[in-house]
Image: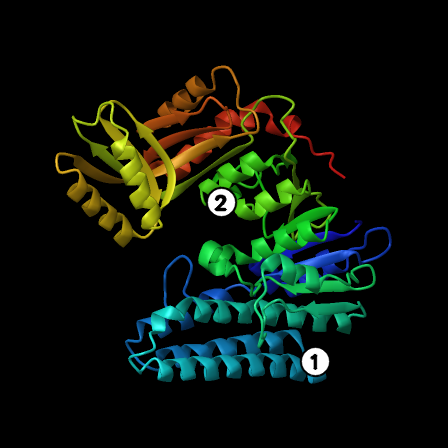
Amino acid sequence: MTHTVEKIGGTSMSRYREVLNNIWRQKKKGSPYNRIFVVSAYAGVTDMLLEHKKTGDAGVYSSFIEAEEKDAWLERLKQVHQYLRNINEDMFTGQLLEAANTFIDVRIADVEECMTSLQNLCSFGHFQLKQHLSTVREMLASIGEAHSAFNSVLLLKSEGISARFVDLTGWKQEVVLPINELIEQAFADNTCAEELLVVTGYTNCAEKLMQTFDRGYSEMTFSKIASITKAREAVIHKEFHLSSADPRIVGEENAVAIGMTNFDVADQLSNLGMEAIHPKAAQGIRKANIKLRVKNTFEPEHHGTIIDNAYCNPRPCAEIIAGRKDVQALEVFDQEMLGSPEYDIAISRLVKELKIQLINKEADANSITFYLSGNRKMINRLVRLIEEKFETAEVKLDKVALVSAIGSDLNVKGILSKTVSSLTAADINVLALHQTMRQVEMQCVVAESDYDLAIKSLHQTLVESENHGSVIRTEVA
């Protein structure tokens, strides 16, 4: 096919005028068409509908399930409704505003009626609310994507661009289909050569995407559409470039936009919580042999970063310095551990059952350390369960940071020595050091307070001093 499938993130969507000018009005071969867009909710909307992703502050969903105040969720839903109407008023006037408000008014009214009825129904002992919570979560999440997609089509049409709203939220859908079948039906008559297709990032399907991917559902929708419609290229528009490090830490003048890399590198970034794309979404695009391009919404002339499974840097080097702060190092020491795989197997199983993210782990004769990220209550519970299971073990929990050098080929002679020397010169103590034989990632464990300085130090040593920009291919069409 000649079309592309493109995803626009929530932060970009909120700056809709720039999206209009930098993305939707951009023409390839003289036409704005042959593109399918999967859109996220406007920034902050999903946090208001569910719960704040970073702080955990209550949203409509979390208020509904906590039920400390029976109508707290209803008040939050009204706040969301007003917030969405405010967005409409910022975008439109006259008949366009009326159409946008009518659409969201109906959706919100339907949700309110449904949740009120469910709340009343579950006041009877035979009906348990917890059996329906995943469905409530999915229904609430769908509002944000439906709102942004519908508004986008209104905006495009008002600018003289032919566009169509493709609603995958399954609103009042009688039969819930598997995702592949649903998308095949939705795009059986693919008219993207004649109009821009704007698709909701949320898909209501038999697989219940949120149960597996939670907030990553829009990327799964994007991936499935790209692979099923056999897109020429998949594109993700973000508010930043995929760079050699966070520009806010190393300085914009020092960060280099990566020209090309591969899906292996993308997975390493995802493991550190810096997703270019959800690993499962990347898997679908990779298996379909589709190249993925990550672009900065606000620099439309920049070609962005191509992620291609076959790519390997022509000269071994560190491409990206990345990391994360919110890491708990769980160390289990037991003199009886030597030669027994039981500790690793049992603890790994508990980590999975408690839905705690495992970032890395290391072991010696008598100890094993798991580097974890997740809810602190769950991690504390994990500690208690380990102590109960292994009565002779000593369990220690420390808050640390991970700083990684990542590249498609890190087989650089002396890179470990350079890394340790750089951190030592910055007066940073290395608590642990990991490097696999695959030579894709090297990971340093440092005190959380040393995180920013460690990123700067390694970027200066492994990227800036190596003239990183001359190594990475940037002549991408």
Which residue matches tag 2?
274
- Count of numbered circles on the image: 2
Residue neighbourhood size for the residue with mark 2, other residues' Cα within 10 Å, grouped as few (<14), some (14–19), many (≥20): some
Residue at 56 percent of width and 31 percent of height: 319
State whether residue 280 is above or below residue 142.
Answer: above
Residue 205 image point, x, y percent: 56, 63
Residue at 60 percent of width and 28 percent of height: 468
Taking the view exactly as shown, the residue that stands out farthest to the left is 392
Residue 44 image point, x, y percent: 49, 65
Residue at 17 percent of width and 38 percent of height: 390
Horizontal side of residue 377 vs 409, given as left or right: left
Taking the view exactly as shown, the residue that stands out farthest to the top is 413
Horizontal side of residue 324 vs 469, given as left or right: left
Q: Amino acid at mark 1?
A: Leu
Horizontal side of residue 318 vs 196, given as left or right: left
**Residue 310 visible:** yes
- Helix, strand or loop status at disc 1: helix
Residue neighbourhood size for the residue with mark 1, other residues' Cα within 10 Å, grouped as few (<14), some (14–19), many (≥20): some
State whether residue 229 is above or below residue 87.
Answer: above
Which residue matches tag 1?
96
Residue at 69 percent of width and 42 percent of height: 290
The mark nearer the N terminus, 1 or 2, is 1
Q: Nearer the viewer, residue 300 or 392?
A: 392
**Residue 48 visible:** no
Q: Which mark is residue 41?
A: none
